[in-house]
Image (cartoon, coloured by chain):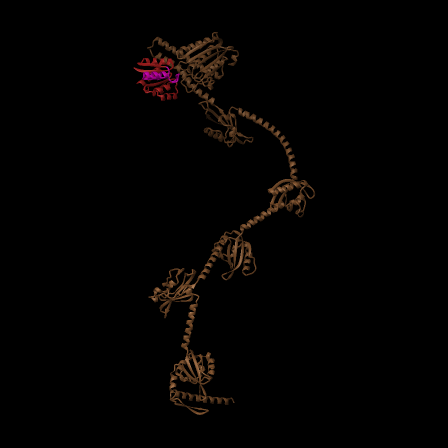
Chain colours: A red, B brown
Amino acid sequence: MKKILIVDDQLEVRELVEVTLKAEDYKILKAESGEEALEIAKAEKPDLIIMDIMMPGAIDGIEATRLLRKNPATKDSRIIMLTGKGQEQDKQIGLEAGADDYFIKPFSPLKLIQKVEEALG
Amino acid sequence: MESKRKKELVEQIEALQERLRETEETLEAIRRGQVDAIIVNGPNGEQVFTLKGADHTYRRLIEEMKQGALTMTPNGMILYCNKCMGEMIKLEIKNIPGTSMERLVASEDRTSLKELLKESKHGPSKKELCLETPDGMKLPVCLYVSPLVLDDRTILCAVVTDLTEQKQRQKLLQSEMLTRTIFEQASDGIVVCDASGRIIMANEMARKMCGRDPGGEFFDTAFPLRWTTGGDWSSEKLTGGDYADKPLLNRESIHGLEGTLTKAEGQELSLLVSSTPLLKEQKEVIGRLITLTDITEQKRVEKALRESEEKYRLLVALAADAILIAQDEEIKFSNPAAEKLTGYSADELSKIPVVDLIHPDDREMVVTRFKRTLSGEQAPTNYSFRIINKGGGERWVHINSTLVTWKEKPATLNFIRDITELKQTEEKLRESEKRFHDLFEHSYDAIIMHRKGRIIDVNQRACSLFGYPKEKLTGMAFAELCFDTSTESCQEQFETALREGSKRFEAQFVKKNGDIFEGEVSVRLVNPDEEIIEGIIRDITPRKDAERKIKEYSQELENMVEIRTKELRRALYDTEEARDRIDGILKSIGDGLIVTDLYHRVQLMNRAAEDLLGVRLSEVIDRSIEFAIKDENLRSKLIEALDRRESGYVFDFEIPEKNSRFPRIIRSRTSVIQDKMGKETGMITLFFDVTHEREIDRLKNEFISIAAHELRTPLTSIQGFSEILLKRDDLGEGEKKKFLSYINKQSVNLARIVNALLDISRIEAGKGLDLEMSPCDLNEIVRETVSCYQSFSEKHDFEVSLPEEPAELTVDRHKFRQVLENIITNAIKFSPKGGRIRVTGELKEDCYQVSVEDQGIGIPQDQAEKIFDKFYRIGHKDSSVPGSGLGMTIVKNLVEAHGGKVWVESDIGKGTTVRFTIPKEQSGREDKI
């Protein structure tokens, strides 16, 4: 069973993503800040991380992605950015930080499933 | 008579001839011995002379004699002569008898013959005389004549002895004597050597030279000569000794050898030696004749002459004066100094005419003098003139010309000295003297020279000053010119001058007319030995007057100056005031302003521009604008703008800001300055700080992006959950309800955000907020709001402190709550997890104050006020913090709409406290908003 880590400061978004992916056969992990996401990723080594960008605290999604990619223990996880920052330059920054895909809020849950499958496939 | 005498004479001659013929025949017969006896008719009758017989022997004897013998009559007619006589006289014997003896004798001796004949009549006599043969040969003979009286007739018998040999012998003897004398008395030493080189003979001089008789010695031994002329002239060579066996080879003569002989007593002789071979019969060398000439004296003289010549040669060569010998208008001789003087080489000098050397102006004079000197006339010999040297230069020379003989012709010997410098010096001296004299004579000051107090010379000014003629003044005592009171003082000053050399003082003097004047005296000791003092007196009366006048004038001027100064000061004050006003205006302009001339030189710069560029006007005034601007980019931009010379040209630039990461953005606009005539005189450049405007622009852009994000967040839930609700049919009722509540909640949230944006735009547009005022307990609202957050954000520790008494104020309940929520949301946003957020409500005298204190990152002091600006977000880089950037702006607007105030207190890193007040009395509230 593949592990998916959902990182978002907003409870509702976390829940939305979780609900969306629940029908599929995944183990869902959740973090509400960059710091938490790094801890869990190190411990659980998820196959996929769905990462928000704008989060309170010292480590935002971009920084968290960079750190994950730097750490040998976590560098192999697939990362999909899921963010409200929808400008082209934001996407550029996200992909440069190490994300495999960039998905803009608001989003269609069905499309997210496709993205996740693509990422894990 | 005549013819009769002639006839007689012819008859006599014929008779005589007949007798002569008979006699001759007789003699012939006698000679041939055919006559035995001769009968002679005489006064004593006939006499018979027998020839044959007794006297025959004698006759033979006489005939055969080797001497001439003859008989003759006392008057000299030859009667008989022997054979020898005939041979001597080279005549036929038969022709001799009957001839007069006189004819046989040389004409010069005929007188002697006559005397001899006369003498011999008295007894035997002899004489030596010469016979002359028909062919002219002279034969010296001794004629011995003795008388023989025969039969009373006297016959002269003569014997003729040929003296030729005897004469020769005598001559030889005399010659030998002479040679010997010459040999002995010769002034040269003469040595004769034999073929082996041994000395046979040496004359007295040679002996003297040798110091002994060198006879028998070898030449070398006798005369050990050191040769001064080349070669080794050994004895053999000189005497021919080594040629002894080859006598014919040794025929060479050696001449002109010189050597030195040291005599026993140490005296040195210089000898000239010659050696000549002695030949026998012009063939065989039998010896050598060596002559030794003492040339010691000659040598000495030569040496002295040589030395003397050398001395003169040197003298001439080294003479500083040019020496020239001129003859026939040509230079026959010149020394090196002459070459130097004229610039011509000696060779060139010998080729150019003398006149060419003389300056054209002096030519005639010099040439005339030369000619006169040469012709022996009186002419100046010492004078000066100018020459022209090779380079065409003019030199002054002094000549000393003497008449001499050069190659047997008159010439001039000239010593010439270059006196150009001397002339120049003289000229200068003369000029200087004249100048001094002029100075002395025309000096404005009176000059009086006096010796021991007695005036010896004065200038014109002295005469005119004192009113005495020069003759009178000269000779007066200096003291006479001094005013009584000054006399003594003058005397003292003069004594000082004598001691110290010079002195300057003032004294009073008396003119001839009795006037007294003030004089400034300068005395100088000119000649200490004679105590000559030069006194320069200047009448300073006019000067004193002038000084007084000047003083008056200057006082007047000072007064004028004072008045003018006052006026100026006032004008200056007015100007300054006007300037200060303009300055003040310029300085007060918030925008930067720079005025430059057409050459970009800074003419004016206000304070704002100074601050902006970081320079002071005083540092850059009148210097190119380039010096005023440190930033290269701005400098080039500004110069480019100034070069355009157009009004309204705009460009922007950035200036780094010290306390901010963000540069200030400055917009510049240039304008052309025109004077009254419309002529361009420079440029005005204005600087506006557009940082704020730019910031607003930037914030606006950012706001759009943030607003979009903020709007997306609720939309995410709405779209996501609604899609799940629509597409999924496996959801339980509880889940469905929960998802719907999320959709609803986020819709409300979305509406709130939209409202906030609308509020802002309304505020921006200047429209008032719609407040729904109602009395509310603020304590309750605070408590409710915080508790809502407490449950919502469990990561923070909330503390609420509220007054006990109720705080009932009239407010818009929702807006008050919005204010509080916005502040708390910020506190949460900027605080770390677990941070404490304290919310305090206080009831003050005239207001209710709420404070929200967090332990967050804090706000820099300079930004504390800015947080209320629209779209301002602390730490732009920290984009992770969500927010519209409108929260605090809305807070401020809402608080102020209630008539309250909001402010921030913050410590970086420790936390921030936001406080706001709501006044108890809301009076005038409507007016404010």
Would you say B164 lies left or right of B573 here? left
Asked whether the viewer can see residue B108, the reply is: yes
- Residue B52: x and y in percent read 38, 89
When the figure is inspected, residue B892 is found, relative to residue B657, above or below; the finding is above
When the figure is inspected, residue B399 is found, relative to residue B248, above or below; the finding is above
Is residue A47 rendered magenta in the image? yes
- Residue B106: x and y in percent read 45, 79
Q: Which residues are magenta?
A: A32-59
Residue at x 47%, y 25% (from the top left corner): B666
Of the pair B108 and B385, the residue shown nearer to us: B108
For the view shown, which residue lies furthest in the left direction? A1
Is residue B115 rendered magenta in the image? no
Residue at x 54%, y 25% (from the top left corner): B586
Would you say B928 lies left or right of B91 here? right
For the view shown, which residue lies furthest in the top direction? B805
Of the pair B424 and B100, the residue shown nearer to us: B100
Asked whether the viewer can see residue B759, the reply is: no
When the figure is inspected, residue B239 is found, relative to residue B155, above or below; the finding is above
Residue at x 43%, y 81% (from the top left corner): B144
Q: Quadrant of residue B833?
A: top left
> How many numbered dots are placed on residues in this image?
0
When the figure is inspected, residue B226 is found, relative to residue B685, above or below; the finding is below
For the view shown, which residue lies furthest in the bottom direction? B45
Of the pair B355 and B84, the residue shown nearer to us: B84
- Residue B118: x and y in percent read 47, 83
Q: Quadrant of residue B448?
A: top right
Of the pair B907 and A55, the residue shown nearer to us: B907
- Residue B675: x and y in percent read 55, 30
